[in-house]
Amino acid sequence: MPVQTKADVVVIGAGIVGAMSALHLQQQGRNVVILDRTGPAAGASAGNAGILAFPEIIPIPSPGVMFKAPKWLLDPLGPLSIRPAYALKIAPWLWHFWRASSRKVFEQGIVTQAAMMELAAVEMARIRAIPELAPFFDNTGTLDLYDSEESFDAAAHDWREKEKAGFEFRRVNRKEIEELQPGLAPQFQHAMYSVSGVQINDPKEFTRAVCAQAEAAGAALRIADVTDIAATGDSATITLANGETIEAGTVVLAGGAWSKKLTARLGDRVPLDTERGYNTTLPSQSFNLKRQLYFNDHAFVVTPLSHGIRVGGAVELGGLDLPPNYNRSKSLLAKAGRFLPELDTRGGTEWMGFRPSLPDCLPVIGYSKASRSVVYAFGHGHLGLTQSAATGKLVSDLVAGRATGMSLAPFRPDRFN
Ligand SMILES: Cc1cc2nc3c(=O)[nH]c(=O)nc-3n(C[C@H](O)[C@H](O)[C@H](O)COP(=O)(O)OP(=O)(O)OC[C@H]3O[C@@H](n4cnc5c(N)ncnc54)[C@H](O)[C@@H]3O)c2cc1C
């Protein structure tokens, strides 16, 4: 006889979004079971750059982006690539991306992201106040570097929008750049410095620690592969790979880039795909890195972690199944070596992760059309760590049926239909 159990709330996925959702729900007095087929921090949350990128309110699909894309695509190891074997499959996603790049949708996206980031900063401050989690936060400040005055000027609109949203930063000249980060190649004469730049110094251990906090508050963590969800009246039933079923008052789907199969089981058509990203983590002694460095014209970052220096970024559209192409991380590392001539690029560990991405670069946070007993929380793309605590708060409001305090219309699962 297959085992049948009952639960109050089941969270599928122990990445940073699932962990934050579980912690918030448990703090609100719910009884949570967290299920992950591998364990905490098995996906994108393990190897990201660790940046709490609250000022990143500018959507990637922007007017004119489709004119820039072909130039990037010409360089097979450039900031954006499409794996030939995946080109047809990604076409519908790219069509939605193109539609999201209209001026109207882009400007609405800035308003939405600004509101989400305001909540993200408030909720992450609450997480930082937990003594066991506070040591993961570092206030390093952020240096945004540009190759030329022309590219610096081209970013003026984005900086104006960030200023309007209340973020503080200042333009710095070469002398100040050298003080903020000695050892940068002379081409970097133009930069913006954000003194309030914050980061998580070990994203993998942070995710595990958030999970551990949820467990300490009473949540149960189980290794289990969820193969099906069905909405059954005012509850939902999930099926595990071993045949076991769990009937839950509410299921929160936070399965990152792998969430789409389960949404389809509930009849929701969500154009979730993945923007694969690559990086290399070098030993700490590789360079005297003072703070996060964004190389804006090359779409990659260098961040100081507690256990090393992480060099990475870029976007590869290639789905969930194709093998990694580590020439991409090698290419980013080689560029970093040119931009930071004293960087020792030997002895690193390469990694590829699956950003869970919707074409408009906004997450899905909302109820399944099948039932309010299924809440979706996935698709945070480049910003999942940054927006994880805010998502946890919104998820716990949805589970409780409370008003969320901000409109979730831009995050609706059916917004592309
Ligand atoms: C190179 C790179 C750099 C990045 N840098 C940053 C950054 O600096 N700042 C930032 O904010 N964001 C960054 N991101 C994005 C961020 O990492 C992601 O948005 C975030 O980690 C997504 O979290 P998640 O919990 O939704 O998904 P994941 O971390 O991928 O977790 C999903 C979990 O669900 C589990 N799962 C899935 N399906 C099932 C199933 N059926 N049954 C059981 N378990 C299941 C998986 O095992 C996994 O553990 C970066 C991403 C990449 C790739």
Image: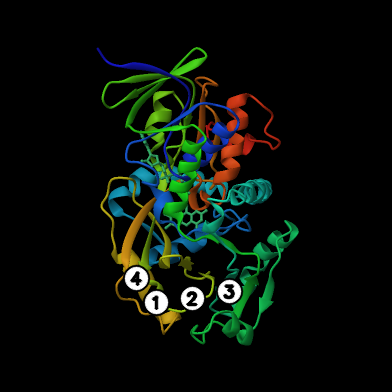
Q: Earlier in the sequence, mark 3 or mark 2?
A: 3
Which residue is denoted by mark 4 in the rendering? 331
Label number found at residue 289: 2
Residue drawn at (54%, 60%) of the image: 199
Residue drawn at (41%, 50%) of the image: 44
Quarter of the image with the N terminus is top left
The span from disc 2 to disc 4 (Cα, nearest Å) is 20 Å
Label number found at residue 341: none
Q: Secondary structure at mark 4?
A: helix
Other residues around mark 4 within 10 Å, as few (<14) / some (14–19) / many (≥20): some
The span from disc 1 to disc 3 (Cα, nearest Å) is 32 Å
Q: Earlier in the sequence, mark 1 or mark 3?
A: 3
Residue drawn at (72%, 56%) of the image: 165
- Do the numbered discs 3 and 2 sit on residues whose CB atoms are within 8 Å? no
| Viewer can see residue 230 | yes
Amino acid carrying mark 3 in the image = Ser
Residue drawn at (60%, 57%) of the image: 56
- Do the numbered discs 2 and 1 sit on residues whose CB atoms are within 8 Å? no
Which residue is denoted by mark 1 in the rendering? 285
The span from disc 3 to disc 2 (Cα, nearest Å) is 24 Å
Q: Quadrant of residue 63?
A: bottom right
Q: Is residue 320 above or below residue 177?
A: above
- What count of labels does the image hold? 4
Other residues around mark 1 within 10 Å, as few (<14) / some (14–19) / many (≥20): few
Q: Earlier in the sequence, mark 2 or mark 4?
A: 2
Which residue is denoted by mark 3 in the rendering? 151
The span from disc 1 to disc 4 (Cα, nearest Å) is 21 Å
Q: Is residue 299 above or below residue 100?
A: below
